[in-house]
Structure formats: C-alpha cells, structure tokens
C-alpha cells in the first residue's frame, strides 16, 4: 500500500527531523530522525516495507523491529489524518 | 509621514517615530468606529476587550478606545489619544502586519557589529535586562516588544525606544508613557538588521544550548505575536515564519535571567553549542 499527503497538510524537513502542520486543526507534529526517514519514504511513494528497509539500514536495527515501528507510526499518522492511502 | 516596521505611515495621531518621505502604505485617521461585525473573541479580565470581523476590517474595542483595522488603513476612535498611540505601535500593528500577510514575534532585538540578536521569552524572563545590558555596551536597538521580518533573516526597525519599569529607568532620560513606563530612546538601527542569533528564555532550558528541529520550532511558535485566535491562513504563516527563521538563524534556549554580556557577544560570533555552554 502506498500513501499520500492530504492537501491540508504541510510538511518540511528541519535539522534532520520533519515537522508536519495540519491546517484544519492548526496543530503540528514533529518527527524525530527515524520518523523523518519513515515519512520521507512514504511520501515519496514507498510502501511501509520500503520504509522499514530504510530504517533498518540507517539505524542498524532488525527488519522486524523496524517494521513494527513503521507500522505503529503509519497507524498514528493515518488516524491523525496526516497521511492517507493513495487510492482514496 | 513616519516609518514603522518598514511601512510608511501617514498619521493624524502624533507618533514617536522617524520621519520619511514617499508614498503612504498605511494611513491612520481619527474617526468614529462602531463595534460591529462577527465577534471573534472577547475577554473581561484583566481588562475588557473584544475583536470583531466586519468584512475586510478588524474592529478592536477597549473601554476607552476602538480601532478599525485593514491592511492599508486604521481608524481610531479614542477619548484618550495617548492611549491610542500606545496601543497602535505594537498590539494594533501586529494585526496590521497580519492583515498584510506578515507574522511577527514577541520579543526584543539589538544589533552589534556582527549582526542582530533577538531575545524572546515570557514577561519577567529577563529580556529587558539583557537588552539594557547590550544597549549600555554600545549595541543599537532594533525593536522592543514586536519583531517583524523582511526576507528570511532580517529584522525591520521598530519604534526607536524601549519601555522601562521605574526600577530600571533611574538615571535614564525619557518621558513616562500612558502605561506608566519610561520611554527610553537609545542609539537605534535605521535599517533592516541581519539576524545572527535568536535567544529564547524558558524555565525548561538548563545550560545555554542550540535548539534543533521541532524544539526550535516549539520555541519560536510559542513567541508568535498574537493575542487573538488565529484567522484563516495565519497559523500556516506563523509556522512558515518560524521554519524560515530556523533555516537561516541559530536558535538558543537559555534559562531566564541567565544571559551575560560575554555570552551574548559570543552568540554573534557563531559559537558551537559546546563553546557556548562554557561561556
């Protein structure tokens, strides 16, 4: 599954992190360096598995651990409507 | 014609600002203002105040003064003109800038040979003390209370005075304003000043350290000049202002009332965080 950023969401990289602004709620979220790697993978068309590969390589963790973290973050981002499935 | 945060102002109210020539950007007129329009926000304590949106105009009402504000004109309805002038220069002007698409920050800034330093933080955190220390060391005032920007890292000169409480005013020349503070006119910058560093006071900070990523964003977002709920588009403008500043200017967090003269000078010399913590 791939994802897209909804039109009401703005994001930007800063100092190796990513900050995301939801203009509907006026709230913003900061992703740390590992979250930034996941976000960049997903918004550039990658799947959660692709994102896990990048995290595992970048932070020298097992694929299982990386996948668990990716899945948890994706769930949160979709719940917060900061990310949506690309097929919508 | 006067100059206020980069805008040429033609005012029927006397304002303590430098005179300039050129076409008018914003006119200030005396006239009746009715408190009409959709109520945006109001409060009763510590003082009664309301804000309404009437088409393209914002209507601000205090007990003794009302303003009708658009991006090119302010109408002032006041029994106390001194009070109106006092409110115009910062509180009202922040809204004029917002109507013109410019976010601003709450803080003060001084300029030295290596650039300007902006000092942000809540009331009582030591901003004025730090600013006075630098002014006494020969730095120039850029702006006090409201910080407005041009490009991504240059500060616009504000009114050329700082407002001091009685305990800091002793021995300094100036006049008492309607709020009971002394207006002290130090040496002031006449042109936009390149920002070399931003220092944010906060109890959550320990030893002085550079703030990165979302910590830097948090620090600046908290200091955006706004006392009203955000209008459509304002939150994004403020977000982008903070991000653009972070991209171009280092942001440091410091404990309130801990800044020294030596520390401030080193900030403009682009010290590393390790060196700063040894100041």
Image (cartoon, coloured by chain):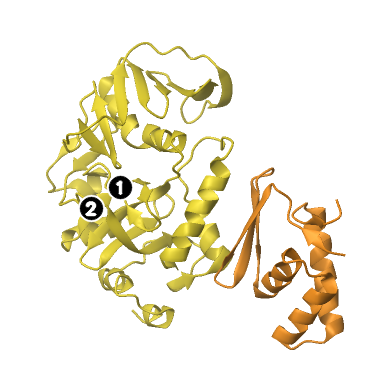
- Secondary structure beneath disc 2? strand
Q: Colour of chain B?
A: yellow
For mark 1, name the chain: B
Q: Quadrant of residue A79?
A: bottom right
Tell me if B185 is positioned left or right of B39 in this view. left
Q: Looking at the image, which residue is at 52% across and 35% down?
A: B228
In the rendering, at what x and y percent does residue B153 appear? 37, 58
Q: Residues within 10 Å of mark 2 (few under 14, many from 20)?
A: many
The residue at which mark 1 appears reads as: B144
The image shows residue B5, relative to residue B55, as above or below, that is below
Q: Looking at the image, which residue is at 40% across and 33% down?
A: B96
In the rendering, at what x and y percent does residue B134 appear? 23, 61
Report whether residue B132 is seen: yes
Relative to the observer, which residue lies in front, B105 or A47?
A47
Q: Are marks 1 and 2 in contact (CB under 8 Å)?
A: yes
The image shows residue B83, relative to residue B250, as above or below, that is above
Which quarter of the figure is the N terminus of chain A placed in? bottom right
Q: Quadrant of residue B132?
A: bottom left
Q: Colour of chain A?
A: orange
For mark 2, name the chain: B
Q: CA distance from mark 1 to mark 2?
A: 8 Å
Tell me if B120 is positioned left or right of A10 in this view. left
Q: Quadrant of residue B71?
A: top left
The image shows residue B74, relative to residue B189, as above or below, that is above
Numbered circle sitting on residue B141: 2
Q: Residues within 10 Å of mark 1 (few under 14, many from 20)?
A: many
In the rendering, at what x and y percent does residue B223 appear? 47, 51
Q: Looking at the image, which residue is at 26% across and 31% down?
A: B9
Relative to the observer, which residue lies in front, A51 or B121?
A51
- Secondary structure beneath disc 1? loop
């Amino acid at each position: 599954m791939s994802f897209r950023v909804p039109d009401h969401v703005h994001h930007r990289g800063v100092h190796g992190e990513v900050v995301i602004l939801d203009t509907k709620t006026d709230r913003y979220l900061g992703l740390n360096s590992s979250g930034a790697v996941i976000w960049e993978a997903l918004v550039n068309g990658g799947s959660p598995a692709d994102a896990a590969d990048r995290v595992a390589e970048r932070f020298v963790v097992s694929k299982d651990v990386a996948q668990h973290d990716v899945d948890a973050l994706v769930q949160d981002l979709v719940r917060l409507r900061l990310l949506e499935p690309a097929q919508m | 014609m006067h100059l206020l945060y980069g805008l040429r102002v033609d005012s029927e109210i006397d304002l303590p600002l430098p005179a300039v020539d050129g076409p008018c950007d914003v006119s200030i007129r005396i006239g009746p203002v009715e408190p009409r329009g959709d109520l945006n926000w109001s409060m009763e304590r510590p003082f009664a105040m309301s804000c309404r949106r009437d088409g393209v105009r914002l209507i601000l009402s205090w007990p003794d003064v009302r303003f009708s504000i658009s991006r090119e004109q302010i109408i002032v309805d006041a029994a106390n003109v001194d009070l109106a002038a006092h409110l115009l220069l910062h509180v009202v002007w922040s809204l004029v800038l917002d109507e013109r698409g410019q976010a601003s920050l709450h803080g003060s800034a001084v300029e030295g040979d290596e650039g300007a330093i902006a000092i942000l933080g809540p009331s009582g955190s030591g901003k004025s003390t730090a600013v006075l220390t630098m002014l006494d060391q020969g730095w120039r005032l850029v702006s006090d209370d409201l910080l407005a920007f041009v490009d991504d890292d240059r500060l616009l000169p504000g009114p050329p005075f700082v407002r001091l409480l009685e305990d800091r005013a002793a021995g300094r020349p100036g006049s008492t304003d309607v709020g009971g503070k002394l207006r002290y006119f130090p040496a002031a910058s006449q042109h936009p000043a390149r920002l070399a560093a931003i220092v944010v006071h906060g109890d959550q900070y320990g030893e002085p350290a550079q703030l990165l990523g979302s910590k830097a964003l948090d620090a600046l977002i908290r200091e955006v000049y706004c006392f009203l709920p955000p209008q459509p588009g304002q939150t994004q403008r403020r977000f982008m202002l903070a991000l653009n500043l972070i991209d171009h200017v280092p942001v440091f967090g410091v404990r309130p009332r801990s800044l020294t003269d030596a520390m401030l000078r080193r900030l403009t010399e682009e010290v590393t965080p390790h060196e700063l913590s040894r100041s």
